Image (cartoon, rainbow, N blue to C red):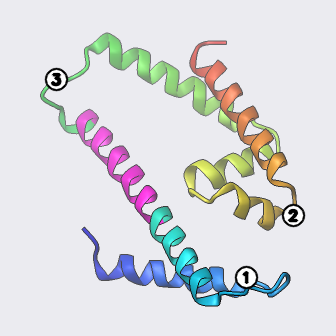
Amino acid sequence: MLDRSMVADALQTLWLRIQKVGDDPPINDKRSYLFALAANVAWDQGRELARRRKIQAEADAILWGAERSPSAETMMIARDELKRVLEAADHLSEPTRTIFWLNRIEAIPQRDIAVRLGVSRTTVEKHIRRALSLLGQARDGG
């Protein structure tokens, strides 16, 4: 379900992306390019909304209970894993920490992070893989 604020946010994001577009190389079909940008903004916003809804549903299940509540043991294991992951996240080196945060928490695409930080997309991918590996090891107790 969309509301006016979501539409306004999408338009603002689209406007900001348009402002970043240069004309080198020249864009031959500006109308198609605009529609592609708008579609990308809509997809990004939809993914972000789905991610937020999933997190909210998980939080509600933990806080208010669900039809099938996890056992005390499962909850204790999950809390321990979360603690280890958060501690590992605190110790990620820069720029790995910033790149991971921008991509996974703020849902900024890798190409936009690369442009923002002035690095290659491959560099961004490398830092995200490194963060995922380290956080996965922490989750698993390594």
Is disc 2 placed on a helix, strand or loop? loop
| Rendered-image quadrant of the C terminus | top right
Q: Position of residue 120 (x, y in %)?
A: 86, 55
Where does label 1 land, which residue? 20
At a point 19% along the width and 38% down the height, the residue shown is: 64
At a point 82% along the width and 62% down the height, the residue shown is: 117
Q: Position of residue 107 (x, y in %)?
A: 56, 56
Instruction: Answer with left or right where residue 119 lies relative to residue 42.
Output: right
Against 16, residue 66 (above or below) is above
Q: Position of residue 27 (x, y in %)?
A: 74, 85
Residue 88, image quadrant: top right
Amino acid identity at mark 3? Arg
Is disc 1 placed on a helix, strand or loop? helix
- Residue furthest to the left in view is 67
Amino acid identity at mark 1? Lys
| Rendered-image quadrant of the N terminus | bottom left
Instruction: Answer with left or right where residue 58 lies relative to residue 17.
Output: left
Closest to the camera, between mark 3 and mark 1, is: 1
Q: Within 10 Å of the Cα at label 1, are there few (<14), some (14-19), or many (20+) other Cα atoms?
A: few
Where does label 3 land, which residue? 68
